[in-house]
Amino acid sequence: MTCEEARASMHFHLDGDEHLHVERARVHTAGCMHCERHVRALIEVEQELKRLKRYAAPSGLTERILQSVQGIPQKRPLARVTM
Ligand SMILES: [Zn+2]
């Protein structure tokens, strides 16, 4: 399973669907630092949206945010190395 496949499956999971690939995505994420960070970011967005529920965020907002975020190249290194 590639990182892209794992991340796509995580979206199913966060949407509440138990997807065939979710379990494989969990296995991938357990061994992939990049995807682990990604799923944590996803969860933070989900929780933030739940906190802001009274504003009645339109369904699909999370997806749109994530799609726009994923389209931005990461300029900072994923891991900060202390000297
Ligand atoms: Zn990965």
Image (tube, rainbow, N blue to C red):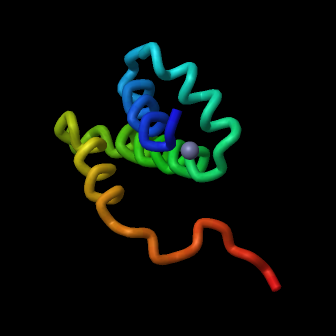
Residue 36, position in %: x, y? 60, 45
Please tell me whether residue 82 is drawn above or below residue 54 in the rendered image.
below
Residue at 59 percent across and 52 percent down: it is: 34
Quarter of the image holding residue 31? Answer: top right
Q: Give the residue at the far right of this rendering.
A: 83
Image label count: 0
Across and down, in percent, residue 12 comes to 38, 26
- Relative placement, left or right, of 30 versus 4 is right
What percent of the width, then of the height, locates residue 68?
26, 57
Q: Position of residue 42 (x, y in %)?
A: 45, 44
Residue placed farthest to the front in the image?
Answer: 1
Q: Identify the image quadrant of residue 82.
A: bottom right
Q: Kindly identify the residue that appears in the image at 61 percent across and 34 percent down.
A: 28
**Residue found at x 44% / y 69%:** 74
The structure residue drawn at horizontal position 27% and vertical position 40%, both measured from the top left corner, is 54
Q: In the figure, is residue 20 to the left or right of 33? A: left
Which of 29/39 is in front?
Answer: 29
On screen, residue 71 above or below 12: below
In the picture, measured across the screen, residue 3 lies left or right of residue 26, that is left
Is 41 above or below relative to 69? above
User: In the image as oriented, which residue stretches furthest toward the left?
Assistant: 58
Q: Quadrant of ligand 1?
A: top right
Q: Quadrant of the C terminus?
A: bottom right
Instruction: Name above or below for residue 11 compared with residue 41.
Output: above
Work out whether residue 9 or residue 42 is closer to the camera in this orientation and state it: 9
